[in-house]
Amino acid sequence: MSEQKLDAAGLVRVLVEPIVEHKDELEVTESVMENGEILVEIGINEEDAGKVIGRQGRVIKAIRTLAWAAASRAGERVEVELID
């Protein structure tokens, strides 16, 4: 099986962009933490926070689950955080 490169930030952007109204303020950054885990940070307008979090956190949890599944398939670990 060939080595797959995970674009975690791209995946998260594709999932979040249709949800937010202020698309011009959407920022998705990817960095590698000291333990080798990929950290994806989502920066959005405050008005869109409720939509991205969802009722009882269901939307952000689903985004994290999809990112985790894609990362595990590529042999990586990923953490998704929503920043203000």
Image: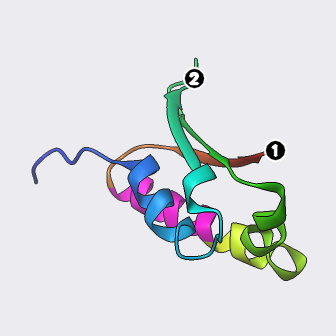
Say which amino acid is labelled 1. Answer: Asp
Cα separation, mark 2 vs mark 1, equals 24 Å
Q: How is the image coloured?
A: rainbow
Q: In the depicted view, which residue is nearer to us: 76 or 84?
A: 84
Q: Nearer the viewer, mark 2 or mark 1?
A: 1
**What is the x, y in percent for residue 8?**
43, 49
Q: Residue at x 35, y 58 (%)?
A: 73
**Between 66 and 51, which is closer to the camera in this rendering?**
51
Q: Which residues are magenta?
A: 63-73
Q: Is residue 30 left or right of residue 64?
A: left
| Residue closest to the eye, 64 or 42 | 42
Would residue 12 be found to the left or right of residue 75 on screen? right
Q: Looking at this rendering, what residue extends furthest in the top direction? A: 34
Q: Could you tell me what secondary structure mostly forms the magenta stretch?
A: helix
Please report the residue visible at 72 percent of the width from the left and 69 percent of the height from the top. 52
Left or right placement of residue 77 versus residue 41 in this view: left
- The residue located at (71%, 69%) in the rendering is 61
Q: Is residue 70 magenta?
A: yes
Residue 84 badge: 1
What type is the residue that disc 2 sits on? Asn
Rendered image: mark on residue 35: 2
